[in-house]
Amino acid sequence: MLDLQAVDTRLDQLAHQEATLPQTAQLAELTDRLAELNTDVVNASTELSDLSQDVRKAEDEVEQVRKRTTRDQELLDSGSITSGKQLEEIQHEITSLLRRASELEDAQLEVMERAEGAQARVDELSLQIGEVQQEHAKVSAALEVAVTVIRADRADLDSQRAGLAARVPTDLLALYDKLRDSLGGVGAAPLRGSRCEGCHMQLPPTDLKAIVEAEADEVVRCEECRRILIRTAAS
Ligand SMILES: [Zn+2]
């Protein structure tokens, strides 16, 4: 019975160990981190795509103003305009087109810098995602190994338990299992001297006397915690 209790205690410990493996918490943390990074990279990519559009738009605008300036300049150079007033108008337009081009180029430069910044963020986030994914795979593999080892131990102990349980009378086994359920996994405890090792209480002399005098095959229980008491050779 005490061997069975030892195996059951070990099984409980292994179940607890499996449920509280540090890798499980680490994986949850890494999964959260990945979700955050993925959200960030989606946002940064959207920003980058918007800015890339802005860059193209700015380029088109600059191009249009330049074309118009060239056209005006060609017209001026062709000598086909003879009216002084018209010449002055064209000259004036060229001046304002050049100013406009300069403004547009500044704006274009600014949007290009912002696009570069967004590209750098996307690159950095992608790098971080790669690192976290690697770490996730590493911890995942370690978890699998740890679980496999624990499961193998549990399988061994399960078969040991079956062998030990088969030697315990059915009624006693049912009582033991019921006590284990309600008393933190310990259904049977040795009696050491006058002390119950289940609840660590000293038994009153009258209880102890009754136990000592009971038949060897009689099931005796601690009056304090109700556990099955096992009289060992030492007691
Ligand atoms: Zn007790």
Image (tube, rainbow, N blue to C red):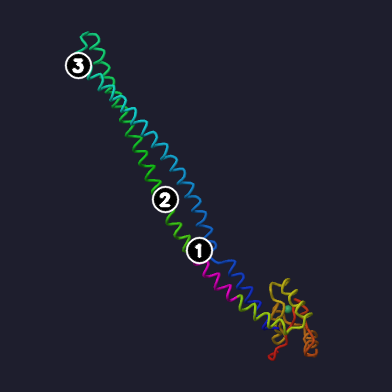
- Mark 1 vs mark 3, foreground winner is 3
Proximity of marks 1 and 3: CB atoms separated by less than 8 Å: no
Q: Is residue 18 above or below residue 189?
A: above
Q: Position of residue 131 (x, y in %)?
A: 42, 57
* Residue at screen point 48% across, 49% down: 38
* Residue at screen point 29% across, 26% down: 101
Q: Amino acid at mark 1?
A: Ser
Query: Does residue 154 belong to the magenta stretch?
Result: no
- Quarter of image, res 206: bottom right
Among numbered discs 2 and 3, the one appearing first in the sequence: 3
Kindly identify which residue carries mark 3.
78
Q: Is residue 198 above or below residue 232?
A: above
- Secondary structure under badge 1? helix
Q: In the shown orientation, is residue 211 left or right of residue 127?
A: right
Kindly identify which residue carries mark 1.
140
Per the rendered image, the range of residues in magenta is 141-153
Real-space CA distance between mark 1 and mark 3, rounded to the nearest whole angstrom: 76 Å
Among numbered discs 1 and 3, the one appearing first in the sequence: 3
Q: Position of residue 203 (x, y in %)?
A: 75, 82
Q: Nearer the viewer, residue 56 or 130?
A: 56
Picture quadrant of ligand 1: bottom right
Real-space CA distance between mark 2 and mark 3, rounded to the nearest whole angstrom: 56 Å
Kindly identify which residue carries mark 2.
126
Proximity of marks 2 and 3: CB atoms separated by less than 8 Å: no
Q: Amino acid at mark 3?
A: Ser
* Residue at screen point 67% across, 83% down: 3
Q: Quarter of the image containing the C terminus?
A: bottom right
- Mark 2 vs mark 3, foreground winner is 3
Mark 1 C-beta closer than 8 Å to ligand 1: no
Mark 2 Cα shell of 10 Å, populated few (<14), some (14-19), many (≥20)? some
- Secondary structure under badge 2? helix
